[in-house]
Image (spheres, rainbow, N blue to C red):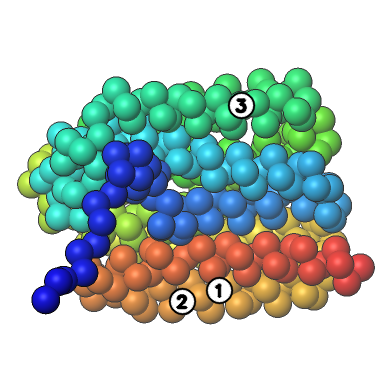
Amino acid sequence: MSQNVAPHKSPFAHKLSLYLDLIRWDRPAGWLLLLWPTLSALWMAAGGFPGWHLLAVFVLGTIVMRSAGCCVNDVADKDFDKHVKRTAVRPVTRGAVSSKEALILGAVLALVAFAMVLTTNRNTVLWSFVALAIALIYPFTKRFFSMPQAVLGVAFSFGIPMAYSAAQGAVPVAAWMLLLANLFWVLAYDTTYAMVDRDDDLKIGIQTSAITMGRFDVLIISLCYLFYISFMAVSGVLYAYSAIYFLALAVAAVLALWFIALIRERKREDCFKAFRLNHWLGFTVFAGVALNFVLK
């Protein structure tokens, strides 16, 4: 009796699946964490819906640049990742994709993102070079900086000044306050992420905020959430936003409390769950910003 055997993938399909795995296509939490604060800033800067052009530029640009960042990060970390349970099977780490291939893919994706930025204005194009420089520096900071998550926080927040620049042609003080607020949120969720790998990271000798914070990790993460919500509330007051925005912040605060409860015991699975769900906090804040303008 004949058996049904699944056909082998073609070389092209196999390579495509490896590239999609490299850019974490099936794990959207990373680009969602980038997207929601960027869109919140875009709505704030535009005073409501920013138009389809800017929306497309920042949504697609966020996804593409995060994918490019994954390529660079995996090449930079390949010698470390092989010693970490969660990352040992990444395509570059296990040798399924060469470092050269990954860097070429990353460069192509970065050029695609840059082409989109070119459709905005001169100031935004100039800011994009700063954003790229910070994104390239981040993967290497784990070797010498005790809080590399702070550098990631700046990189993951740089869509905010770029959104203001694209919508208003300039970057006001309000944009930098939003960037500072978002920096605290990134520190909260990425330190939670670093807690997942803390045992492995200690063995291989790289620096993370989870290691630096030590036994005060949960307390400091809690304070980071508090600072984030507080700064966002101050922004709402300065902009004279309606009650719906502050209601959204209250829901975001409840989510933050849930994430803090999840990580209290510092269990690997619970910390990873808290990290993966953090994008809902960002979505909640964005929903409050967008609804504020709709209901006005």
Query: Residue 63 sits in which quadrant?
Result: top right
Q: Which residue is mark 3?
A: 114
Depth check: give the residue in front, 161 or 287.
287
Neighbourhood count class around disc 2 (C-alpha, 10 Å): few under 14, some 14–19, many 20 upward: some
Q: Which residue is mark 2?
A: 257
Name the residue rendered at 43%, 51% in the picture.
25
Name the residue rendered at 67%, 43% in the picture.
58
Label 1 SS:
helix
Note whether residue 75 is visible: yes
Q: Are marks 1 and 2 in contact (CB under 8 Å)?
A: yes
Name the mark on residue 253.
1
> Left or right of 205: which side holds 111?
right
Marks 3 and 1, how far apart at CA:
35 Å
Name the residue rendered at 67%, 62% in the picture.
286
Number of marks present in the image shown: 3
Q: Quadrant of the N terminus?
A: bottom left
At which x and y percent is residue 273?
35, 70
At which x and y percent is residue 137?
39, 27
Marks 3 and 2, how far apart at CA:
38 Å
Label 2 SS:
helix
Marks 1 and 2, how far apart at CA:
6 Å
> Left or right of 36: which side holds 239?
right
Which residue extends farthest front? 1
